[in-house]
Amino acid sequence: MRIAVYGATGFVGGLVVAELLQRGVDPVLVGRDRGRLRAAAAAAGAPDAEVRVAELDDGLALRGAFDGADGVVGCASPFTLHGEAVVRAAIAAGVPLVDVAGEEEYVLGVLERCGQDAASAGVAVVPAANNDCLPGDLLGHLVADGLGELETISVAFTATDTEGSRGTVLMALTTQETMRTGGPVYERGSYVRGAPARRTEVRWPGAAAASPVVRFALPPAVTIPRHVTTRHAEGLASPEVHAFFAGAGPDLVASMPLRGGPDPQSRARSRYTLVVDALGVDGRSRRATLEGGDVYGTTSVIAVEAVRRLVDRPGPVGALTPAQAFDAGDFLDALAPAGLTWHVEDPVTP
């Protein structure tokens, strides 16, 4: 298997290349600078790995960079600026793609604009295969199962001891208005911007009491309604997480090296939690939770697992949410070696 990684010289791109090598998969490092690609290959322990140069504004070269690959992982942040060019090049090359985007508006745009072209090309495109977006979407599918139509579903995220990479900070800066306002939510068949949060508190696992949360631009809020029948869906985060993304500034980006990211010790200390709460129109409710650590290492594992499954287990084609592309429970179980634990509670009847 040969997997092309666009943005292989970045922090997450390097982790994805390393994860591919660990699984015995041949990476093809793709980017805009041959010297940096060679350096990235050497840093990953594969100095002889194939590298290909392609600018994002050269569609023909970008398509050619993916020729002969079995799959593509997009890692060029911010995806709002760079992501769709990579998606369209993969579609043109007839190669399935996942990316590690976390930008809600970008993810929604890919699902809405690229689906027909991907389906016509016979390939699957799955954006947002990262540490919180993919599990959040899969948990949304599982938590809704058997509840019938939902009145609302929310996905809440919190993290501790987690440092940002340069790519994450640049993404936050590029999409700062969306980060400040909380992005779109799903409301009775359409996506609405600027709506207040329905929930202002969440009780995190193990906590004795509920804690404040705020509206947050979390992609599962726009992906879950594509496979779950619900009247409303929203993303939420702890105030600390929201403040980090909403407050990112250019000085912080400029101070970070091009491949800047947390060191292994910092990554090992970090923890994050996802809580997905569903309420049926009949009053029944159910909760799903996921806990993990090392958001960047987990993202590389999830992206590689996702692209491997698209290659090994061909299924639906088009622009897909994770739950449309993969078996939710089976995928989540496969993440146990990466330290992720999850469970879905039994429905609560009023």
Image (tube, rainbow, N blue to C red):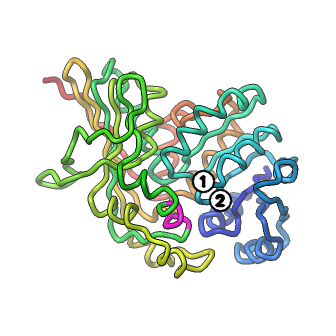
**Could you tell me the amino acid type at mark 2?**
Ala
Residue 333: where, in percent of width, then height?
Answer: 47, 44
Q: Nearer the viewer, residue 276 or 111?
A: 111
Q: Which residues are magenta?
A: 167-171
Badge 2 crowding class, 10 Å Cα cut-off, few under 14, some 14 to 19, many 20 or more, is many
Above or below, 335 against 38 in this view is above
Which residue is depicted at the point 21% across and 47% down?
202
Q: Quadrant of residue 188?
A: top left
Which residue is depicted at the point 65% across and 41% down?
309
**Could you tell me the amino acid type at mark 1?**
Phe
Badge 1 crowding class, 10 Å Cα cut-off, few under 14, some 14 to 19, many 20 or more, is many
In the rendered structure, are the residues bearing label 2 and label 1 in contact, judged by CB atoms less than 8 Å apart? yes
| Badge number at residue 79 | 1
Instruction: Identify the residue under disc 2.
Output: 76
Residue 224: where, in percent of width, then height?
Answer: 44, 33
**What secondary structure is found at the residue carrying circle 2?**
loop
